[in-house]
Amino acid sequence: MCGIVGYIGDKSPTEVIMSGLHRLEYRGYDSAGVAVVNNGGLQCIKSLGKLKIMDQKLAEQPLDGKLGIGHTRWATHGVPSEVNSHPHFDMQKEIAVVHNGIIENYQELRDQLTAEGVTFRSQTDTETIAHLVRKYYQGDLFAAVKRALQDVTGAYAIGVISKDNPDLIVAARHGSPLIVGLGDDEAYIASDVPAIMKYTRKVLYIDNGQVCEIRRDGYKIEDVHGNPVQLEVKTVDWDDAAAEKEGYPHFMLKEIHQQPDVIRNTLRGRVDEGSEEVKLPDMNISVEELKACQKIVIVACGTAWHAGMVGKYLIEKFAKVPVELDLASEYRYRDPIVPEHTIMIPVSQSGETADTLEAIRIAKRLGAKVASIVNVVGSSVARESHGVVYQQAGPEIGVASTKAYTSQCTAFALFTIWMAEARGVMSKAQAKEMIAHLRAIPDKLQWVIDHKQHIIDLAALPKYRDAQSALYLGRNYNFPSALEGALKLKEISYIHAEGYAAGEMKHGPIALVTDELPVVCVAVEGDTYDKMVSNIQEIRARRGIVLSVATEGDEGIKQHSEDVIYVPSCHEPFSPIVVAVPLQLFAYYVAANRGCDVDQPRNLAKSVTVE
Ligand code: M6R
């Protein structure tokens, strides 16, 4: 996830662009760049690190002009560096492109362009767009962009300018957000409304497959084949403070809502439509290593550890390899045994968690191959691992992890299918079926979000909102869901909450059940459903307040539960991804009703870089 801004008009383009980029810094902040058309040429400044470094550079070397584009980056292809930061250029440096998204066929395009004599400067997927536009440019930039995009698959929101066109920005969208702002004799492009709210409230929401020719006094929109498109100009009435959160009161709620797109992004480029194969080349593990693997060790902390538990259940069930799941803070202080052919999978959103890093160093010393699941590109965990699967979830700002968790579970699902197929324990037909189930998940998450009103109503009831304590129960794949649901509630609402494997209830925790104790029971369809219902009955018999999370259409569960939250029917092994969303929403609304600081709960930090 990155942020793009463009401006054409009488104001200083760099001022408008930098002001917009600051409003988009939540989308990425590892490097930035601005290019303007000036004196018949393109001028550009780039910087590594946060936008304040770019501000300093621009103060020392101001860029002037009547039009420009800028970018704040969240690296996906190529480490954060000046050379990989946007804008990217054609070989002659006459066409500049900023891009948010992922070009899935970039390697193929890169090979093809290289064979045609193009020299690449960066490791990014974006640079291919600049060279493609050049390839098709015959004096009409709008036409060249439309033609270039016909060669591209993947997700993009782009802004393109050229030396020859001092009065034109071409922008296009497919899968990544893009708006056009309209002013008096001026126009803007941006990834998100907050970037331009200071200047205009008149906005066009560009849709997938649309390309725009934007001039200061007008615009034209077509699809990539040149068919005209009409869009209604909308007026935005958000107040400024809510704008960065796109109208959501907290980043956590915004990030919960982003999950359908996040899961699509985690899958993007790794499973093609109709495919029976998973591609994870950046893990840097060969098929021979997958076949020879004797043991997998997963290490992580907090929510990432819960995702690791989902990974353990999946890998053991389908890839048939023993998995050891460790809290990174424990792994480093015991004497772990690392047999030959061990693969370690560290999991970390930030990629900077101190304990996880130390666990990696120990495992490497003991001879393990380390391939991590990480969100932040170029982070320490990614750099110290032999390979990596980037989650592609975009920056997570809320301290309570939400979208990072579901994308980590998705990454484990991908890894499982890949490993199971490589080891010959999953047929192509089964892999294809599993992939289809995975691809169906974003719509199921959207269903939960669309039906959130019931969760909002429940979270306002005093029996939940004012509870002193809560239990969360689940079995099998949804034991980690219980742990994660409880962690979400306790960290943001300060209600004491514990997650348990439902089978453990009778071994102690059932003593806690009273008519004041909410017990959240994950009882979705699947192999352990009947056992969960028995546990629910045991709790009800002791007058506990049962809130069940069940599969849509399960009317029977109502007679055993005080309240029910439904989720759509789902392939059981992937149900933790779907179940996570109502548990996040429930915790969020309980905490918000209690007046808690949801995004920055007391005593917590987003990234735990000390022991
Ligand atoms: O950045 P990491 O994924 O390594 O962070 C691990 C934990 O600190 C993190 O998941 C923490 O538990 C979250 N606050 C949970 O919401």
Image (cartoon, rainbow, N blue to C red):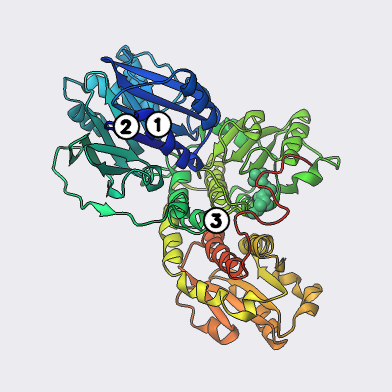
Amino acid type of the residue that numbered disc 2 sits on in the rendered structure:
Lys
Q: What label does residue 11 carry, if any?
A: 2
- Secondary structure type for disc 1: helix
State the image quarter where residue 444 is shown: bottom left
Q: Name the amino acid type tagged 1.
A: Glu
CA distance separating discs 1 and 2: 8 Å
Q: Is residue 433 visible?
A: no
Q: Nearer the viewer, mark 3 or mark 2?
A: 2
Kindly identify the residue that appears in the image at 16 percent across and 37 percent down.
Answer: 225
The span from disc 1 to disc 3 (Cα, nearest Å) is 30 Å
Q: Which residue is mark 1?
A: 15
Residue 464 or residue 359, whichever sits in front: 464
Residue drawn at x 81%, y 46% as measured from the top left: 330
Quarter of the image that includes the C terminus: top right
- Residue 96 screen position, x and y as percent: 33, 23
Mark 2 burial class by Cα count in 10 Å: few <14, some 14-19, many 20+: few
Q: Residue at position x 43%, y 33% from top?
A: 18
Say which of marks 1 and 3 sits in front.
Answer: 1
Considering only order in the chain, which callout, 2 or 3, is on the residue closer to the N terminus? 2
Q: Position of residue 371 (x, y in %)?
A: 63, 35
Badge 2 marks a residue whose secondary structure is loop
Position of residue 220 relative to residue 535, above or below, is above
Q: Say if 344 sits above or below 83 in the image.
A: below
Residue 570 seen from this side: yes
